[in-house]
Image (spheres, rainbow, N blue to C red):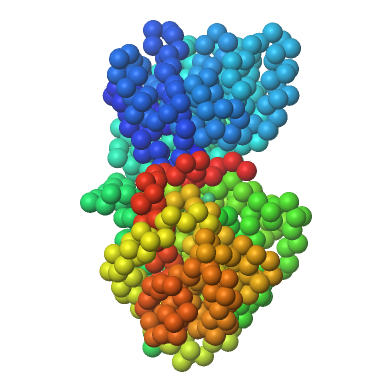
Amino acid sequence: MCGIFGYVGNKKAIPIVLEGLKTLEYRGYDSAGVAGISQGKTLFYKDKGKIGHLAKLLEKKRLEVEAAIAHTRWATHGKVNSLNAHPHFDAHETLAIVHNGIIENFQKLKSDLVAQGIAFVSETDSEVIAQLFAFHFQGNLKQTLLKILPLLEGSFAIAGVHRNFPKDIFVACKNSPLAIGVGESEYFVSSDVNGFLKYTNKVIFLENHEIGLIQPSGLKIYNEKGEIVAKQTESITSKIEEISKLHYPHFTLKEIYDQPESINRLFKNRFEEEFGAICLKDMGIDEETFMETSRILILACGTSWHAGSVGAYLFESLSRIPTQVEISSEFRYKNPIVMKDTLVIAISQSGETADTLAAVHELKAKGAKVIAVCNREGSELSRLSDHTLFIQAGPEIGVCSTKAFTNQVVLLSLLALHLGRMHHLSKEEGIHFIREIKKLPGLVSEVLSCADEIHVLAKKYNHFTHFFFIGRSYMYPTSLEAALKLKEMSYIHAQAYPAGELKHGPIALIDSNCPTVALFGNKHTFSKLLSNMMEIKAREGPILAFAPRGFDEVSSIVDDVFWLPDTCDEFASIPTSVALQLFSYYMALERGCDIDQPRNLAKSVTVE
Ligand code: F6R
């Protein structure tokens, strides 16, 4: 979603902020812009379209500024056009601001300012921040921020420049992340630490209601009362090499191929096989918390919710703990009941998803203990939660989540085994599951080695415009995830159902133009799924099956089968999902889609 980047220092600011914006491109955007102060004037360039287009505009202008702010916009309020693109300014262009988040009371603030004779030029909520700032400005940046920020309802990360302070960037945030990279006599501001990793791994995270004034010579952070705050500089361990496509044509394909390694990374020092035990000590959660857990509540959105849904089956089956899995945006408004001994697990690759953050805020206010399952170090979710279990998938740049999903499921499997061993699984059962789970990187490699077969299937099926995905038990959330991947990457309509539900209505749509992708990874329900296949065939529906090797009966019923390496039902989601990620990838490739950055999508969904 929207991205902010800013620079103050001795280097040329514009090339640095353009490069910084490029690293945020993966988050999804539709327009881009920059601003800075030059010779007492606020200069800015912005337009709809890609950063490359903005860079070309700037090449001709030779913009020289000492501090610069830049933005990629993902439209929420107002059309995609240059007026609505950021930066925004006041009527006299005394300042420019970029904003992530949503100002929920902007209509009221705007009409008050309009009543004072102030003219607005955009349809955005963000412009009100610039206009309000100028309206209250009496010569002091900090005092103005202290005055206007309490008036803003909603969420914001703001960076701004003012013509009276050509070397300064001012920043502020509330429920939207903003990080400051600390270099040698230079500072970077970004909504995502990946933006400045090339220059520094030293970072200061701005907390809610904090204000920052940044100059090349130093930085000052204040709290909402205007008192100075002593901030800790943290070191980020991600490496810039992890943010490269290498020889792959797309980040998405690279990330699909990363999976054997990313699963192995998560496995490191996790197994005490002879005791059938999982070692999570280093993750800092006291065993008492686990012992006392009698109920689990999982919160997440999108792909992370699918991973959580697989997790719910795992917790109930392996740990025998009742588990509820909720979509964060729905849960939040339910006035949730938090029972004692409930362990809340909030799952988010980015750790920035506004709906999940809001749900966690709500639960924390009710006294719940929250464990984050997250990919991003230093993310807001991780800072908000009592503990974080990092999935260690490495940076995920493709907008469609692939390796983060598998590592989320693997991490939840490890947690479920750990809780299972504490509560009821025998040592022998523990040993059995550890042996099975340890095979996963090898099984994923096997699937990847058959990518060409999946490509052939994609060539055959990519002309269809509607698909059903079905599965039972663990394969139901797996089919939800597979259908989402197909929708996102190839723009083909796909709907997932528990296989048993098809006959309760959706079967009305089955005919020769509506194929079904059937996931057979759950052996326990194999014969039931075969009967569902017969029902589809009786209505001439084409069927593409993803089935474990050895289940030959499948091929006599369905049109095509991709044979998967066999594993136990509990872990079958992993090889199955990887095969279906490849299927969506090749479907999208055949249809010429923008695979790494599908239309309308954003990597970090920072608005509710
Ligand atoms: C789909 C996808 C999204 C995210 C969702 C939650 O491929 O990536 O559905 O899973 O927006 O994002 P996180 O996990 O960052 O909270």
Residue at horizontal 52 percent and vertical 60 percent from the top: 513
**Where's residue 179, x and y in %?**
45, 39
Q: Is residue 304 visible?
A: no
Between residue 567 and residue 581, name the one nearer to us: 581
Q: Nearer the viewer, residue 348 or 177?
A: 348
Residue 229 appears in view: yes
Split into 4 quadrants, where in the image is the C terminus?
A: top right
Residue 282, x across and y down, in percent: 43, 68
Q: Look at the picture and state if 150 lies above or below 307.
A: above
Vertical side of 513 occupied by 161: above or below: above
Who's the residue at 27% across and 69% down the image? 449
Q: Is residue 586 above or below residue 202?
A: below
Instruction: Tell me what residue is drawn at x 58 percent, y 55 percent.
Output: 301
Position of residue 253 measured from the top left corner of the image (x, y, whole percent): 33, 55
For the image, the number of numbered tags is 0
| Residue 552 as seen in the image, left or right of residue 135 | left
Residue extending farthest to the left is 247
Direction from residue 503 to residue 495 in the image, left or right: left
Identify the residue at horizontal 53%, vertical 68% (top origin): 541
Would you identify the image quadrant in which residue 552 lies?
A: bottom left
